[in-house]
Image (tube, rainbow, N blue to C red):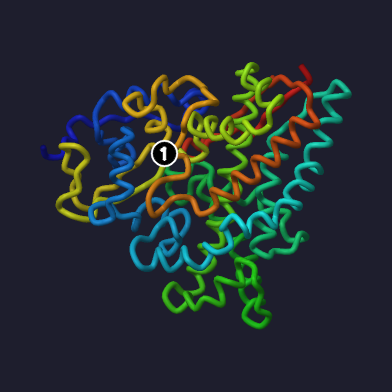
Amino acid sequence: MEALKEKAASWNFYTPEVSRNPYPLLKEIRETGRAVWHETYQAWIVTHYRDLVAMCRDEANFSAKDGIVAHNFGEYTLLAQDGALHRALRMIWQPAFVHRMLERLLPQIRELSLHLLTPVAEKLAAGETADMAPSNRELPVEITAAMLGVQSGQRGNFARWSDEITHMTGYSLPPDHPVEIRRAEAQKGLGDLFREEVARRRTEPTDDLIGRLVASGIETQIGESGLIDNLRLLLVAGNETTSNWFGNSVVMFDRHPDVQARVRADRSLIPAALEEALRMEPATNFSFRRACSDNARVGDVLIPKGDQVILVFGAGNRDPERWAGPDLYDAMRDTQGHLSFGHGVHTCLGRDLARLEGLAYFNTFFDLIDSYKVIEIDYALSFPLRGPQKLLIRRA
């Protein structure tokens, strides 16, 4: 079947209603077709689990290059490359993310979790409300910055810059739009900091993530701007995805007190409960590809060469063809194969770090906070990277 753009739709992912609960809209899109042309975004939307998996594996017909990710994060970043260059970039950092290396960070993660959550527990004990969002955000920012080798005194703007860069990610805005202006300013601020760090590594080699990138020689292929772009992406990816996961999990435990009680009683259930929360509420909803051949198909729909495709992982994670009772939170579910960390060659490099952080963070959370109730949630208009930007809780 040829591409059918006459069936174009104009769903809006950037509304308060969709931010609060996107899943009715995602179900509607999934039931509309295997690949649906979106007139406003000028892209195809794909929502079925089997198609998403197939596309993530099909570099011959669907490329990560030359899309909105390249616009937001740079053309030479991990997420905007395929093939040999992507593999070369990934292998520079891969050794730092293997489990035995990450375990060295556990004492720091536990100490930081205690430092961040103790004031929250004290507020609740005093009968006050507490906003979980800053704590959720600061842990991954600090750990990622430490792995990069950025000194603590220089990290103050990281969270703010990260939020500005990812706000309304995936939506093409004119350069004079306020969101785009703030994004550009944040990219420059973070870029200037990393440029100084890269210059320092040229004369003072280190074994941190910045040092490894500089020492790798990859600059001959991607230039200094490519180095900066990849460092910027690593920080943003490590911050936004993990902090959103933590926030969504706090909400999920509140809405399912029976599961929360079981997990509190048996902490070995924390990983499975967090993973199921991630399946239901993925921190990363979108991925992007471009049809790069004359045989790029989704089911029986031919995607014209050059067209952009939006892969909606949040819809695939609730596809009833893949998951029984997909809208039910089942902490005992086998979540293997969920798409929240991506799939294929672009599977999230830091997934094991995020899992390690989550286990330590929620163990500490349950140790310090004996009961709580979510009383207010505010989601930013950034559906591709969705999570609570304000999350007020009180003692139950």
- Residue 123 position within the rendered picture, expressed as x and y whole percent measured from the top left: 84, 28
Asked whether residue 388 is in view, the answer is: yes
Does 289 sit above or below residue 394?
below
User: Which amino acid type is shown beneath numbered disc 1?
Assistant: Gly
In the image: residue 239, left or right of residue 336: right
| Residue 20 position (above or below residue 314) | above
Foreground pick, 334 / 311: 334
The N terminus sits in image quarter: top left
Per the image, the residue denoted by label 1 is 337
Q: Is residue 350 left or right of residue 171?
A: right
Query: Quadrant of the rendered structure where residue 10 is?
Result: top left
Left or right side of 356 for 74: left
Tag count: 1
Residue in view at x 60 percent, y 50 percent:
353
State the image coordinates of residue 193 (x, y, percent, origin top left): 65, 65
Q: Report the front residue among 53 and 8.
A: 53
Identified at 32% across, 37% down, the residue is: 40
Report helix, strand or loop for mark 1: loop
Spot occupied by residue 82 in the image (x, y as percentages of width and height) = 35, 60
Outermost left residue: 1
Residue positioned most to the right: 126
Residue 220 as seen in the image, left or right of residue 378: left
**Residue displayed at 45% across by 79% down:** 220
